[in-house]
Amino acid sequence: MPRKLAVLALLATVLGVTAADWPQFMGPTRNGRSTETGLARAWPDGGPPEVWKMDMGKGFGGAAIVGDKVYIQDREGEGKDVGTDSLLCLDFATGKELWRVSYDAPGKFGFGGSRTVPAVSGNRVFSCGPLGHLICVDTEKQTIVWKHQVWQDFGGGRRPMWAFAQNPLVMGELVIIQTQTPKAGVVAFDGATGKVRWQSESLGDRYGYVSPSLLQVAGKQQLIAVAAGPSTRRRRGQPAPKLGPPTPKVFGLDPATGRILWRYTGWQCMTPAVVPIDLGDGKFVVTGGYNSGAAILQVTPAADGAFKTTELLRTKALGSHVHPPILIGEHLYGNSSDNGRKDGMVCMGLDGKLAWKTGKEPIFDKGGLLLADGMLISVDGTKGILRLIDPNPEKLTVLAEAKVLNTPQCWAPLALANGRLLLRDQKQLKCLDLRKQ
């Protein structure tokens, strides 16, 4: 069995889902890759058929899909004494709300609304709210089984500027998130009881927005955690901040114990948000905005059970800001615009050579991205334009495009199952049929 298919089969077994489901952030293998086939390579005027749509509060939380159910996080109200987080369950065929579980979560933060994608495992859904509430919901009883305030429980101080953004990772009996507090960098909870199974040492004194990801090294899984580097922001009229010597910001952890196996210092990002992506053979790419660029690293076993981390490449050619790039062949494709850099979609070889970039036309700013049936599906996060792209290292090749979302800041992750795409802006969730008609 090819390596990627073996990983998919393993994760599907662990999560208790089928290959056709989209049970968590970035899909079955947590890397934006779908096994879907039979998708249309052209759309009628007006874009792919709309199956349904529903109103939602503002936010950036994407959907998880298992069987005939959709799970998505929503948020209503924001203020010092106002705010409610909800986990919604919808009928995948019609968009009808089947049930919701809500809890009080008063507070206000920049770019308000939901943040993350639930993770589904069997009859349980794990969801993390923007103020640090991690809940486990029983889908049959439609009740909260357990709940933690992970930011406060582990010594978090002032709330992060852009709130708490963690997409839960399910590994067997464990639910893992990066708390990134002074007491614990990463924490694993027992999925059944909510009991803390382990907590790692601190990863530093600044908060980032990267969820844990997986890496295969010598046939065994490791966790990759990314922490925030020093701020390089310069206040108006003030000199640039003085930076001390770099400290480790990328870590490999043992998923069974939380022990840190290796640390890497070279790549730094002051506000990281993009999950690292496994490239195979112990290699992975880490990237971010704010001129941090990208690095490709190789992890190999060393003596006495230790691990060696080798930097294969560091470059400014790719700088994905919100969503991770996708590997196709020997090239990475990523939406690489941020608040200052306007590179649009970038195609970069694994050798670090820039194949092409779109710049501002089209800009693809912060929009979601996934791979299905040999095609890239991408949203322009500024204009709400959905594009179907034939990946080609020679040039951008757009097969079809349509404006399908109406508000700016269309930054939520995409979800695809059974030929239907779920995507969201600041007012609504839409379901589109991408299958051949």
Image (tube, grey):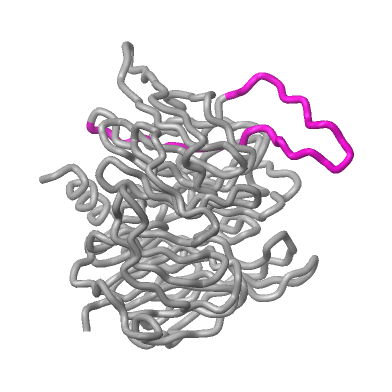
Would you identify the image quadrant in which residue 162 lies? bottom right
Residue 214 appears in view: no
Image location of residue 68, percent across then percent down:
30, 78
Would you identify the image quadrant in which residue 165 lies? bottom right
Q: Is residue 71 above or below residue 53?
A: above
Count up the numbered dots. 0
| 212 magenta-colored | no
Q: Is residue 336 above or below residue 93?
A: above
**Residue at x 68% of width, y 41% of height:** 155
**37, 253: nearer the viewer:** 37
Q: Quadrant of the N terminus?
A: top left
Q: Is residue 68 above or below residue 304?
A: below
Q: Principal SS element in the magenta part?
A: loop
**292, 103: nearer the viewer:** 292
Q: Is residue 78 above or below residue 295?
A: below
Relative side of 107 to 31, left or right: right
**Residue at x 40% of width, y 33% of height:** 352
**Residue at x 45% of width, y 75% of height:** 142
Relative side of 41 to 185, left or right: left
**Residue at x 31% of width, y 48% of height:** 393
Image location of residue 286, percent across then percent down:
45, 38
Image location of residue 220, percent across then percent down:
27, 33
| 225 magenta-colored | yes
Residue 261 appears in view: yes
Question: What span is colored magenta in the figure?
Answer: 219-247
